[in-house]
Amino acid sequence: MIESLLVANRGEIACRVFRTCRARGIATVAVHSDADAGALHVREADAAVRLPGAVPADTYLRGDLIVKAALAAGADAVHPGYGFLSENAEFARAVLDAGLVWVGPPPGAIEAMASKTRAKELMAAAGVPLLAPVDPATATGADLPLLLKAAAGGGGRGMRIVRELSDVEEELKAASAEAASAFGDGEVFAEPYVERGRHVEVQILADAHGTVWALGTRDCSLQRRHQKVIEESPAPGLPDELRAVLREAAVAAARAVGYRGAGTVEFLISPQGRPYFLEMNTRLQVEHPVTEEVFGLDLVALQLAVAEGAALPAELPAARGHAVEARLYAEDPAAGWAPQTGRLHALDVPGPELFPVAAAAPRLRVDTGYSDGDTIGVHYDALLAKVIVWAPTRAEALRALRHALRRARVHGPGTNRELLVRSLGHPDVTEGRFDTGFYERHLDALTTPVPGERYAAVAAALADAAARTTGGTLPARLGGWRNVGAPAQRKTYGEHEVRYRATRDGFVVEADDGDEVQVIAAAPHRVSLEIGGVVRHFEVRAYGDEVHVDSATGAYRLIARPRFSETGHRAPPGSLLAPMPGTVVRLAPGLAEGTRVTAGQPLIWLEAMKMEHRVTAPASGTLTVLHAVPGRQVEVGALLAVVTDTDAQDAQDAQEESSP
């Protein structure tokens, strides 16, 4: 029996495993980097061991240090979570060799599935349907589009879609470099890219006594950069015959490698309904909660039981209802999914008060590794929380999850919350017509600015004024928004300037366009405005110059601008600035000062929160400044390089010389 468990991971998944351990009376041990010294998973564990350093290569990827930590803390078992070393056969062997219980599949099964190319060979022998591989060196136009994939690892790293033969060589190099950086293995293979395919997977659970469960299906087609955003179970709209094929193929895959524990077999479903094996994840998946909610199971508890030698019941539990999970990321979808960092002031998703307690009522769950006041850094994944809703039907689950996200308070760095809300209400999603290309087609529409921001700015300005008013309260009925000529107070948030006057009866807001707006009430944290005859309520919280305004129609993150802007440093024309804090991972081959570059050419690659971002040349010209160095950490807005349009400069110099 496991008495003390170390989780070789961090954040949300570590907290998730600890929750089950507490319920089962198992002591918990956390490991942490220096950047995570005060993290939630460290605070929740019974004991914690420091891994010196901050970057994953020095900490969470150091299997030798983690095994030593387990022994030092008196743990008798290790759970790998997901990511990091969870699919590393050598780490699994090291854990077992140290006399510890490994809460995962046998090292041989991990090894068999570690390389996607070798895994496909095994699956072909087991009769699992596959896509035929393509040799990039001999590919023709008939093979396009191609999907290049890293043979090791996952999470969309080292993955490229190629639509032109002329791009194959360059994209192969880029995919190989990214794979080598992420997984230490630069092997890349190619296969046909299935347009408008769906990503459907089967959760499996196997014991050491010959029983293999196939726990329904999950649809994970809503992805950005090949990383999942919204998942659900069961996968909607699949014929019963196809569901049976997927379950049988998943069980065959598990038996082919002597699998034990929890794992996932992933498939691509073509528009014609043909399934193709993608890969097998030999670990717990991020999206496992939707399966737990539908089947009424605790998969972590079952992992622990299987690791202790228990046998699974021969009969699977019955599935009921529908569950949907949304991943709340600290990122800006409109800016190339750029990660966001900083202090998380508040994270609150309404639960019992949102949905009544009843047998058939929607059930909400939040899995997170953060709490109010924590800092979101640059070293790790941008996932803030997973918000999961179960309901009797898919339509109810989608609506309830959308409602919960809309009502949530998420104060701090920018997030994808609004994208999630809009996605869950999009007709293609509600009607089950989506595929893996959903965000490529709809991202612009889903990331248009949230309407009503100017009213949020008004609410923020009035809340600020109320906080500075004696007593902090104002009369119930206040002045309207109207044109007046008297001097007014001014407050600016982003592009919105709010002008208002404090009168004996309350505040009067000025406008230049004659908007019919009445100020109903204003207090430091709540403002009510009558807009077009409808009263809207705004909850306002200020954290220095950062102001968050929540309302039933949207959430807004505003930055208060100083009344008199300071003259600051301006970057020279042609500057390449870091779009987010991160680490320079590589430069374009041969890049140096004096190199000629073309507009749009990728020059510098940054990595932040396990995602890689390309910085391209803003114009054609000569690289005259290069500050970026591989391995160097940079802050947002840091000057990486300067491209000078030398042709334009030469023309200007010639014109000046010829002028009298």
Image: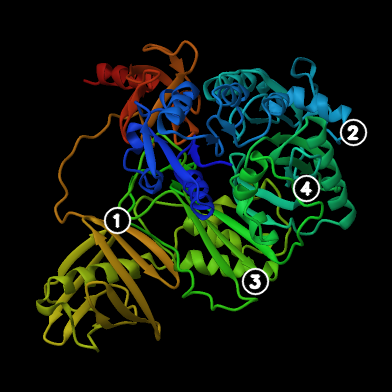
Q: Position of residue 186 (x, y in %)?
A: 61, 18
Spatial distance from mark 4 to mark 2, Cα to Cα? 19 Å
Spatial distance from mark 2 to mark 3, Cα to Cα? 38 Å
Position of residue 321 relative to residue 472, above or below, is above
Q: Residues within 10 Å of mark 2 (few under 14, many from 20)?
A: few
Q: Position of residue 425 (x, y in %)?
A: 60, 65
Q: Nearer the viewer, mark 2 or mark 3?
A: 2
Q: Residues within 10 Å of mark 4 (few under 14, many from 20)?
A: many
Q: Nearer the viewer, mark 4 or mark 3?
A: 4
Seen from the viewer's position, the closer of residues 404 and 519 is 404
Q: Which residue is mark 3?
A: 396
**Residue pictured at 29% horizontal, 68% vertical:** 540
The reply to whether callout 4 and callout 2 are in contact (CB within 8 Å) is no
Position of residue 517 relative to residue 210, above or below, is below
Q: Which residue is mark 1?
A: 494
**What's the residue type where badge 1 is placed?**
Gly
- Please, what secondary structure does the residue beneath circle 1 have? loop
**Residue pictured at 18% horizontal, 39% vertical:** 568
Asked where in the image residue 126 lies, by quadrant, the reply is top right
The reply to whether callout 4 and callout 1 are in contact (CB within 8 Å) is no
Mark nearer the N terminus (4 vs 3): 4
**What's the residue type where badge 2 is placed?**
Gly
Position of residue 386 relative to residue 518, above or below, is above
Q: Nearer the viewer, mark 2 or mark 1?
A: 2
Q: Which residue is mark 4?
A: 213
| Left or right relative to 396: residue 342 | left
Q: Quadrant of the C terminus?
A: top left
